[in-house]
Amino acid sequence: MKPDVSSSGPPLVELRGISKRYGDLLANDGIDLAIEPGEIHALLGENGAGKSTLVKILYGVIEPSAGEILWEGRPVSIASPVEARALGLGMVFQHFSLFDELTVAENIAVALSEEWSLSSVRGRLGEISRTYGLALDADRAVWTLSAGERQRIEIVRCLLQNPRLLILDEPTSVLTPQEAERLFETLDKLAADGCAILYISHKLEEVRRLCRRATILRAGRVVATIDPRERSAKEIAALMVGAEVGEIRADAPHRADGELLNVSHLSMPPAGLHGQALTDIDLVAHAGEVVGIAGVAGNGQSELFAALSGERTAGRADAVVIAGQACGNMGIDARRRLGAAFVPEERLGHAAAPTHRLSENTLISHAAAEVSRSGFILLNAARRLAQSIVRGFDVRTPENDPPARKLSGGNLQKFVIGREIIRRPRLLVVDQPTWGVDAGAARLIRQALVDLAREGSAVVVISQDLDELFEIADRMAVIHQGRMSPLKPTAQWTKEAVGLEMMGVAQAQGGAHAV
Amino acid sequence: MRFELTPRANVSPVARALAPVAAFITSFLIAGLVIWLMGRSPIAAFEVYVTQPLTDPWSLQELIVKATPLALIAIGLSYCFRANLWNIGAEGQYVMGAIFGSWLALATHGTEAGFWVLPAMLCLGIIGGALYGLIPAFLKTRFGVNEILTSLMLVYVAQLILDYLARGPWRDPKGFNFPQSVTFDPAATLPPILETGRVHYGALFALTAILVTAIILGRTLFGYRLKLTGDAPRAAQFAGFSARSTTLAVFAISGGLAGLAGIVEVSGQIGQIQPSISPGYGFTAITVAFLGRLNPIGILVAALVVALTFIGGESAQILLRLPLDLTQAFQGILLLCVLAADALVSYRVRFVTRGGGK
């Protein structure tokens, strides 16, 4: 074994030449990575760069095709998450695995081994909460908690097993700026106590705030290991993408008089048991502007999208007015005929059928348009339309007219957005336009949204990505627990103010905008 | 150790086309093995099951007669199955179509009623089957009741109604107390296409249904609506296709076609109402629909193949004293082989040994 010269002992964990092959795809290609005890190490990369694959190998979820893992200098084989935990690894996944109906303490207890009683869990929970500032009420049911609180449960669950290495996968994607800052403080304390942290993200600012070392992946390979504080965000982005990422061009909004969307006093009961009700929502979008709606996931965004698109209809016709026509009680097809277009959050399964070819997928939102005549499908027209979307929006396809599932996330998103924009809609409503999309595609999509607005359409963007909204929105509002904050020009918002609204603090303080 | 199915990156069209052929050969080998284990000659069985029916003119006609109801019902079921809705009750819709149509035949029995009786019977058959099919569809859309259970249980209700009618109100008073109705008048009988032949006009109905369905499923928005509803229900909702009306429509169509098969069988084949009017066509048609991969032309071929096993099974029972149950077993083997061949064309099987990483 080669002695490590840079530090006193061997690294806590070292990956050597890790490769993982899926058919023709090399998801990881000879990756080397070393993490020292007490270090916060960032793993940076675009979607599809191989971050998740690498972490799953480390956590024993999948088996590498080649390479070895050394734990404190000893080669180990990690065949399952159970073995990973026994070794001292803890992982907080991006998507939580919690039982909504159980309390916080119960959720933690079910994941632990049998020697933990519910009362001992409660005791340790209080201790850990105090030490690391992870405020949690042991007896509350999980479904009443915010995303930030749910994440704390997952973190506490890991910490109870005294991990030596904690892995966090995109932990801030569901948090408000203030919640994220509290998470960073917790992580700083943990690292100071000697726990190593592998922090996976594509957000550069937080990596620069938190980490001293970052490994950057691109297309399955390590392209650089850097100190993120010594490089500019632009430099790091270029390393991740492999090319310079341009900025969005936007002329000043020339707001025309046309009011293309007017939502007034829209209220809706929740759709399911844990759905979010919408309460008294007002929203106006004019021709020529991009309206942004911020909020933490699960605060009524998908419900608002369904109400605007007509997938769920409101009781009153005048609750939603599109292009001067009251249509609150009309279905999605009727609203499309009024010149509206919609892009839902979920690409596969909602916006597009995974196994259907792109040409068939054009039929989903074009049923009323030129791809069919008196009930018959015009196959050639559909193919031509798919072709022009592919060309116009730089959709990279593995073959001519492939099934939707063969496209990468970014390319499929470009396709479903292009499918709507190519119709020149007067109103476009988009839910999470660049969720899980690589930087290049995200830039193209944002530019297309801004361009559509500048040509005289109204664009409503519902997004969790605050940076995105500050970049493209002319006016912004925040949705919290199904209620909407006032709509104000973006220049009048600060990130802190948005964060307060996202947590509902601003609404609670003196009811500043109640009636 | 366990099996793992990994999708193949590229599936050659040749392999996809040859898969059913391989499935056929495999199922014949398995069936031959079973027959050999039963102490009979597999070669003689093949002769009786396949060669004789396909070379004898009478058997060939019989093949078409048996394939007709199978094809009609299966083509209707393909609408449901494409939309991922599980109508298991075609047998009941078939019986109800026969009851509705036969009511007119019996009501006009012995009168001077003319040529309109037969078309009206066929229409009544379609209506009866469609209405009966709409019951599980309505229960599903209105109350969320699982359509598999309701459609299946309604089969037994329909069969018992038929049984009651054949033994009670519709029994022929001069029929020596046999549980059967009077024989239908010529005006209520579906004639054979050729005067001397056995093949009746039902075969043409089945062919028409297949062609029309091929156009509807492949070329129309309604066809795409079914495919989208089956493959991605949320996308179908996003496209503005209401799940409720799709459900009602496909159950009405498949019930209507099953009802048509029922009245065609009674008026063209049996000629009267009796307690049993089907050797399980409604259930076998489910096999036919999947053997044909829900493709209209595939269903036509599958209906002929399954009809062959019916006829071959009958001859084998007489000539080789092989039990009739063997026919059903063979139909099952055939379906399994076709499904397995489909899966093996799209997926690669891997044996995974546990304790990897070394």
Image (tube, grey):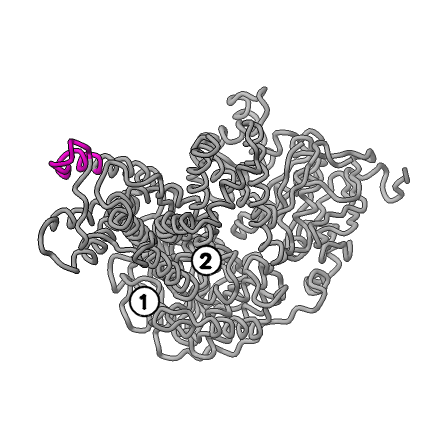
The residues bearing labels 2 and 1 have C-alpha atoms spaced at a distance of 36 Å
Residue A13, can we see it?
yes
Q: Secondary structure at mark 2?
A: helix
Residue B165, percent from left and from top = 17, 37
Q: Is residue A225 left or right of residue A491?
A: right
Whether residue A234 is situated above or below residue A1 in the rendered picture: below
Q: On the image, numbered disc 1 is attached to which residue? A: A334
The amino acid at mark 1 is Ala
Q: Nearer the viewer, residue B201 or A329?
A: B201
Q: Residue at x 45, y 45 (%)?
A: B308
Residue B303, percent from left and from top = 43, 49
Q: Residue at x 50, y 35 (%)?
A: A136
The amino acid at mark 2 is Ile
Which contiguous range is marked in magenta?
Answer: B162-179
Counting the numbered discs, the total is 2
Task: Indicate yes or no whether the magenta region holds residue B178.
Answer: yes
Residue A514, can we see it?
no
- Mark 1 surroundings within 10 Å by alpha-carbon count, few (fewer than 14), some (14 through 19), many (20 or more): some
Q: Which mark is residue B65?
A: none
Residue B274, percent from left and from top = 23, 38
What kind of secondary structure does the magenta stretch mostly adopt?
loop
Q: Quadrant of the C terminus of chain A?
A: bottom left
Q: Residue at x 67, y 53 (%)?
A: A207
Q: On the image, numbered disc 2 is attached to which residue? A: B297
Task: Indicate yes or no whether the magenta region holds residue B353.
Answer: no
